[in-house]
Each structure stands twice: as structure tokens, then as C-alpha cells.
């Protein structure tokens, strides 16, 4: 894109969506950071001082105690930011303490990498020694592309999207299988400082947010958190994820992410195992999405799969209505056969085709039945 005028010519809904009262109310924090009225959460976390050097603490239980105390201080500071005339510039000018709440999060994330228990696979890979996990990532942050994305939901456009390599899912229909499963380590290796510079450049070019995606961002959480130590511009942090991280990682992200974009794919564990090769999907994904919803703004994505309306779509949409009522919902019709489904259509017969019109209309009908706000972002 040459300029923002060109973006909004192509996506006029990216402007019009903010006239919707429901969107303004449910994405109020994100909007305030997006338009530079409030500092992003990572900036606030960076100003919360901790007395200990977290990088020198060996006991994880002690680290989590420090994290818990700092979280209470963060909550107090966040309330102050929300109620007062607290500009991003004034917070960016404040000197960072020697050790901060953000440092504690980075220290914990590094320890969770080796043996790796960042996601609920808990594969135990010695990633810091160079051993790849099930996600195919080891001790490097690998970025395949970073650009202003105009294909995301209207409130997010243009989105400063960073595609990371690797994934803890093995979806047979993955549209990004080249970077998630086949050539995961084929991207560019970047340091945390370089990752911060990428984010800065995207914001200065007009990004409304920094969209951490992939692949899957969870294997890169330590690098992403560390990059925020160096990021010197105010920009909302967006977590675009399958939400299969451990509860510990979810806790690390809660006071850093400004808007969540979780993907709730399946309504049961059987479909999740057959199509993505993950166990205990429903309990893990819903636990993390509920935690995230209760901490901030959210748009939930549900990709409607052919032949999965009753086993997946109905249960997903009903759960959202009962558990995450403030979330906007993108009921997605973009499914197409890709990757292994395209290669072995007989093995995956029910999804070896695109959605029929009557199927997506039925999904919309379910969203109406459960009184979900979906039209603004679907």
C-alpha cells in the first residue's frame, strides 16, 4: 500500500465499522491505544518495577511469586491509566526501572522453553540447546514475512502482520502449511531488537496493531516479549493464535496483549485430533480463551468446516454466547481444501470441498440464535 488513503479505498469498512456502537464499546481499550489516546499494555508493564533481578532467580516458584506481586501493581497502574489523562508519550518518556514486570515475564518464558512447555503438547524439547520441538522451532525467532495486511477484520485494518514459522498444530487443511509445517525454519532469523524494529516500522507506516501470527506465535513468546523491551512506539499488541498454550503462557500474555484474535476451530476433541493432531483441545482452548476474554478486548474466529456444523459450529457458537459474551465473532466462510486434504481427498471426504451456500447461511442462523455480534467482523 502506498498510503492510508489507498487502504481505506480498498477497505472502506475499516473506517465505517467504528461508527457501530457495539464495536466501539467492546473494543474500547484497543481503540484507545490504536488512536494513541492510551499507552499499550506492554508500556505499562515496562514501568512496573520489581526489586529482584528476575534473570538471576533460579526457582520458578519464586519467579511466579514475583510475577504475582507485580501483576497487582500493574492492575493498579492500569486503573490509573484508564481513569486519568495518561498519554502514551508521557509514559514512553518515563524512565524504565532496572527490572520490570516485563522482565519477569521474559525470564519465565525463557525457562518454559527448556524443557519446552510453552504449549499443551509439553514436548520437553531442549530448545535453548538447539533441539526443535513438535512446533519445529528451536532457539531462534523465525519470521517469514511482515507487512500491512488489509484482509483482516475491519477494526484491525491495516494490520501490521508478522508471520512466524512453525506451529504446534498439524492441521491437514492448513492454508499456511509452507511456513507452519513444510518449510517452518526457512524464514529470516531475527533478534529481539530486530523484531522490535520491524514492529516500529509497521506502526510508522500506519499499522493499527501488531498482529503476531504464523504458523503460530506461541513458540516465539519469549522473543516477542523481549522485543517489547526495545519497542519505542505506542501500538496495540494483537495475539492471533490457536490458543493451545499452557496456562502459564496465557498468564504471561494477559497483561501485555491489547486485543485477542483467538481461533476456536472445533467443538470436540475427536475432530481436533483427526484434523489437527492435538489432544484435549476443547478444555485447553476454551480455558485460555475465557482467561483472555476476561482480561481484555477480543474477536473470536470460527472457521466453518464442511460437514461440521453440528459437531463443531453449533457447540462453538453456543459456548461463546455463554462464556465470552463481550467478544465479537467472525463466522468465517473462507475454508478451501489445502495441504493434505488436497493431496488425499478420499481420506478427508467431508472437507474435500468448499462450503455450500446453505451451510454458511446455517452457520449465520446459529449465530443469530445465540445472539452473537458477528456481522461487523464476518
Image (cartoon, grey):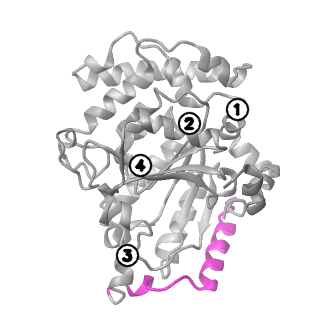
Spatial distance from mark 3 to mark 1, Cα to Cα? Answer: 41 Å
| Mark positioned earlier in the residue sequence (3 or 1) | 1
Separation of disc 1 and disc 4 at Cα? 25 Å
> Given this view, does label 4 or label 2 mark the residue nearer the observer?
2
Crowding at dot 2, Cα within 10 Å, few <14 / some 14-19 / many 20+, comes out as: many
Q: Residue 36, labelled with which disc?
A: 1
**Residue with the mark numbered 4:** 217
Q: Earlier in the sequence, mark 2 or mark 1?
A: 1
Please report the bounds of the magenta region as a residue range: 347-372
Q: Nearer the viewer, residue 135 or 77?
A: 135
Taking the magenta stretch, the answer to whether it contains residue 355 is yes
Q: Is residue 45 left or right of residue 273?
A: right
Front position among marks 2 and 1: 2
First along the sequence among labels 3 and 4? 4
* Picture layout, residue 127 above or below residue 96: below
Q: CA distance from mark 3 to mark 4?
A: 20 Å
Which corner quadrant holds the C terminus? bottom right
**Does residue 360 sit above or below 168 in this rendering?**
below
* Quadrant in the rendering for residue 151: bottom right
Q: Which residue is mark 3?
A: 339
Amino acid at each position: 500500500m502506498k498510503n492510508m488513503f489507498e487502504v481505506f479505498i480498498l477497505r472502506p469498512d475499516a473506517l465505517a465499522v467504528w461508527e457501530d456502537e457495539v464495536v466501539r464499546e467492546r473494543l474500547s481499550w484497543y481503540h484507545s491505544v490504536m488512536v494513541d489516546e492510551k499507552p499499550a499494555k506492554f508500556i505499562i508493564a515496562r514501568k512496573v518495577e520489581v526489586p529482584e533481578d528476575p534473570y538471576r532467580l533460579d526457582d520458578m516458584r519464586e519467579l511466579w511469586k514475583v510475577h504475582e506481586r507485580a501483576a497487582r501493581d500493574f492492575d493498579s497502574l492500569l486503573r490509573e491509566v484508564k481513569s486519568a489523562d495518561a498519554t502514551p508519550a508521557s509514559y514512553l518518556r518515563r524512565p524504565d526501572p532496572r527490572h520490570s514486570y516485563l522482565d519477569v515475564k521474559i525470564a519465565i518464558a525463557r525457562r518454559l522453553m527448556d524443557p519446552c512447555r510453552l504449549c499443551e503438547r509439553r514436548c520437553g524439547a531442549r530448545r535453548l540447546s538447539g533441539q526443535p520441538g513438535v512446533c519445529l522451532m528451536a532457539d531462534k525467532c523465525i519470521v517469514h514475512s511482515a507487512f500491512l495486511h488489509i484482509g483482516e477484520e475491519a477494526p484491525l485494518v491495516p494490520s501490521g502482520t508478522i508471520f512466524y514459522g512453525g506451529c504446534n498444530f498439524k492441521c491437514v487443511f492448513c492454508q499456511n502449511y509452507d511456513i507452519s509445517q513444510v518449510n517452518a525454519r526457512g524464514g529470516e532469523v531475527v533478534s529481539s531488537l530486530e523484531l522490535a524494529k520491524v514492529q516500529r516500522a509497521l506502526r510508522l507506516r500506519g499499522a493499527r496493531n501488531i498482529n503476531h501470527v504464523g504458523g503460530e506465535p506461541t513458540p516465539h513468546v519469549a522473543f516477542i516479549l523481549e522485543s517489547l523491551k526495545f519497542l519505542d512506539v505506542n501500538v496495540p499488541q494483537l495475539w492471533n493464535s490457536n490458543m493451545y498454550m499452557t496456562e502459564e503462557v496465557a498468564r504471561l500474555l494477559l497483561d501485555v496483549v491489547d486485543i485477542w484474535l483467538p481461533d476456536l476451530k472445533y467443538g470436540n476433541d475427536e475432530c481436533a485430533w483427526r484434523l489437527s493432531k492435538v489432544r484435549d483441545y476443547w478444555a485447553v482452548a476454551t480455558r485460555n480463551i475465557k482467561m483472555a476474554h476476561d482480561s481484555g478486548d477480543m474477536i473470536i474466529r470460527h472457521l466453518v468446516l464442511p460437514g461440521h456444523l453440528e459437531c463443531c459450529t453449533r457447540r462453538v457458537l453456543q459456548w461463546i454466547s455463554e462464556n465470552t459474551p463481550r467478544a465479537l465473532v467472525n463466522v468465517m466462510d473462507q475454508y478451501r481444501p489445502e495441504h493434505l486434504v488436497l493431496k488425499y481427498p478420499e481420506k478427508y471426504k467431508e472437507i474435500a470441498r468448499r462450503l455450500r451456500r446453505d451451510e454458511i447461511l446455517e452457520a449465520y442462523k446459529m449465530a443469530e440464535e445465540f445472539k452473537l455480534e458477528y456481522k461487523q467482523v464476518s
